[in-house]
Image: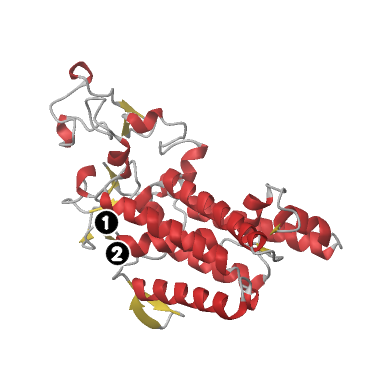
Amino acid sequence: MAECDECGSFENMPYECSRCGGTFCTEHRLPEAHDCPALNAWDGSQGGGALGGGPSAGGPNAGRGPSAGGPTIRRTSSGERSGGILDRLPIDTGATGLRGYYRNNMAFVFLLAMWLTFAVQFLLVGTGEGALHDELFVAHTEHPAAVWTYLTSVFAHGGLGHIAVNSIALYFFGPIVERKLGSKRFSILFLGAGIVASVGSVAAPLLLGEVGGGLGASGAILAILGVLTILNPELRVLLFFAIPMPLWLLTVGFAAFSVFAIGVGGLGAGGIGHVAHLTGLVIGLAYGHHLKEHGMTGPRQLRFGGGPGGPGGGMGGRRRF
């Protein structure tokens, strides 16, 4: 028995969408019934559905075939149907092959990259290569032209507590947003927001004539939180795993804390990258608003656990639509 990502009901024989990887009940198995990212990518110019659903599927291509202008349907080695515009994108959206393991698992890929980077940081500092560590992983006003640090600093962290907190947040909130956006858009959001947040952590002190910088995935994670807040502000979360509250209150409280800290102690008050945090949060809120305007809704409740599920993030025994 599994829970429907759209309505929260439980289904003995759940459907798993072959494009977004979500789990749905019979009522929400069709792509148009669960805001499938594949539908957002389809502009209708192909004369068929984004998922290539044939007449028996009851999808946008019902009653249409290749001769009627719809995309050609093919089957993968696992017997799964595929077709449509997503198959022309420069990423592997299928459920087979090595890259298929990354579909709906990118949150865990980024999580692994964070810990691998942290291991390299530990090695460099432990062998007395602190200067090399800073040149490789810290976005800072002392070397603003070191453009690679705006990316590497997203995965680097300042200590075990720092990476632990960010890992917990990414583990719990990342997969939920990834299931809604799809792995490609989720990856762009994570990396894009993280890089812009790193640039902001350097640009802001430079503009004020100060010295500063930062490292960490907090800006990217706050962007994820911002998207989720807009899609469902009333989503119930547990602060410190114990205090229940709506997500909007957690987000407002976090933003208010950063604004207050900057006002009292400056950009780097408490050794925290408040500029990066606020930058990532603003990006997430703006993107969430864009998604909501286009009809996307958020999950009705958080669904934790499961971890990476192999090719496509799926789990055996489910029907695939």
Q: What residue appears at the point 62 percent right and 57 percent down from the top-left corner?
A: 203
Q: What kind of element bears circle 2?
A: loop
Q: Which mark is residue 297?
A: 1
Residue placed most toward the observer, 58 or 252: 252
Q: What kind of element bears circle 1?
A: loop
Q: Amino acid at mark 1?
A: Thr
Q: What residue appears at the point 35 percent right and 47 percent down from the top-left corner?
A: 21
The quadrant the C terminus occupies is top left
Q: Which mark is residue 232?
A: 2
Quadrant of the rendered structure where residue 233 is? bottom left
Q: Residues within 10 Å of mark 1 (few under 14, many from 20)?
A: some
Quadrant of the rendered structure where residue 54 is? top left
Q: What residue appears at the point 51 percent right and 68 percent down from the top-left corner?
A: 168
Q: Which mark is residue 196?
A: none
- Residue 95: % across, % down: 41, 39
Q: What residue appears at the point 61 percent right and 71 percent down from the top-left corner?
A: 267
Quadrant of the rendered structure where residue 300 is? bottom left
Q: Are marks 2 and 1 in contact (CB under 8 Å)?
A: yes
Q: Residues within 10 Å of mark 2 (few under 14, many from 20)?
A: some
Q: Is residue 156 left or right of residue 91?
A: right
Q: Amino acid at mark 2?
A: Asn
In this view, 25 is above or below 57: below
Query: Spatial distance from mark 2 to mark 1, Cα to Cα?
Result: 7 Å
Residue placed most toward the observer, 170 or 213: 213
- Residue 241: % across, % down: 44, 79
